[in-house]
Amino acid sequence: MIKIGIIGAGRIAQVHARSVSAHSNATLSVVSDPVEQAASALARANGARWTLSADDLIADPEVDAVIICSPTPFHAEQVLACAKAGKPVLCEKPIAMDMDTVDQLEKDLEGLNPTVMMGFNRRFDPSFAKIHSLADEGAAGKIEQVTIISRDPAAPPVEYIATSGGIFKDMTIHDFDTARFFLGDIKTVVAIGQNLDPALKDTGDFDGAVITLTNAEGATATITNSRHCASGYDQRLEVFGDRATLSADNIRPTTVRISNGTVTDGQDPYLDFFLARYEAAYSVELDEFLSAIDEGRMPSPSIEDGRKALELAEAAEKSARTGSIVTL
C-alpha cells in the first residue's frame, strides 16, 4: 500500500481523498491544512491523521507520496520540498502563477530526479481518453480542428476570482492542456475576453473567453469558456480530421428521454459540477500516478506539460488584453 499525504483540504482535496480511499493500492495517511477544522474534518472522514503544517506532512515517515491541493502560490515550493524529500508528487494545476517561478523551480529540481505529475485530469476522462486513443490509431485521419467547450454552471465567489490568477490560469488551463494533448505544441494564440456578467465586472477578470490556438502544421483548436451556463456544467469535445469526426457530448445522470405534449426528447440536465463530471477521471489519474511510482517511471502529464499550459495561459491573457496575435 502506498501511503498518501494530501496538502490542502478544500473541494479538490476532497475529490482526491475519495479516490485514494477507494483505491486498492493506496491509503490516505495524513492531511494538512492551516485551517484546523478543514484538515481535521477531511482526515476523520478518511481515517487519516491531520496537521496544520505542509512541511510536517512532507517530512512524515508515514507518507510515501504527496498530492498537492493547496493554493497555486504554494505549488512550486511544495513540489520542490517533496523532491528534496524524495517523495513522488501529484500537483494540481497550475504549476505556478507565472513563468519566472516555473523557471526557478526547474533549476532547483536539477539533479534531484523528481517524480512529479501534473493534475490535468481531463486527459483521463474516459470519453476524452477514448477520443485520444482513436485519434492515435488514425481513426480521424489528419487532425485539422479541435473544438473544446467548457462552461461552468455558475461563477465562483468574487473573493476566489481575485486570487485565482484569472480565467486563463484558473479555468482555461485545463483546456490548453487538452488542446496540446491532441495538437502538440502551439505556435500562435488569439484570445477574446468577455465581460458580460454584471456581478463580476469589478473583478478585473473576464467572465468568458473564446481562444484560437494554431500548431506548426496549421491545425487549430478553438476553446469556448464561460463562468456561467444555465443548463449546467457544459463539457464537450470534438476532433475533426480528414477521415472522421470524433466527439464527446455532455454527461447526464441517466439516459432517459421523455416526449409528451410539452417537450420532445427531454432529458436530465447535465451533471452540475466538476466534482461529479470528472470523478472517474480523477480515479484514473490517481491510478496512473501510483502505477508510475510502482514501475519506477515518470508519470504523465509532466512538469513540462504544466509549463506549456501556463505559457499558453499567459499568451491568451496578453492577446485578450491587447487584441494581438501572440506567437510562441
Image (tube, grey):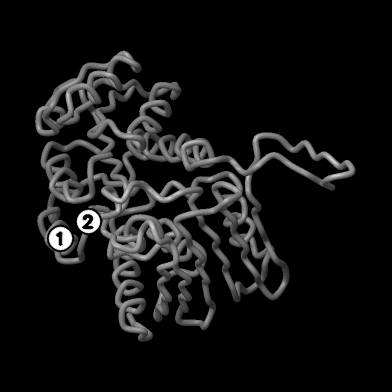
Dots 1 and 2: beta carbons under 8 Å?
Answer: yes
- Type of the residue with mark 1: Thr
Residue 90 lies, with reference to residue 147, above or below; the image says: above
Q: Residues within 10 Å of mark 2 (few under 14, many from 20)?
A: many
Identity of the residue furthest to the bottom in this view:
324
**Residue 63 position (above or below residue 177):** above
Sequence-first disc among 1 and 2: 2
- Up the image or down, 240 lies above or below 167; here it is below
Q: Residue at x 67, y 66 (%)?
A: 140
Classify mark 2: helix, strand or loop: loop
Give coordinates of residue 29: x percent, y percent: 26, 20
Seen from the viewer's position, the closer of residues 296 and 273 is 273
- Report which residue position mark 2 lands on: 96
Q: Give the residue displayed 30% in from the left and 41% down from the top.
A: 90
Q: Nearer the viewer, residue 275 or 49?
A: 275
Give the residue drawn at x 14%, y 47%. 80
* On-image quarter of the C terminus: bottom left
The CA distance from mark 1 to mark 2 is: 6 Å
**Position of residue 60 in the picture relative to residue 64 (left or right):** left
Residue 56, located in which quarter of the rendered image?
A: top left
What's the amino acid at mark 2? Ala
What's the residue at 14%, 53% (across, down)? Answer: 109
Quadrant for the N terminus, please.
top left
Residue 263 in percent (x, y) is at 82, 46
Relative to 269, is 322 on the left or the right?
left
SS category of the residue bearing label 1: helix
- Residue 101: image tag: 1
Classify 10 Å Cα crowding around label 1: few (below 14), some (14-19), many (20 and above): some
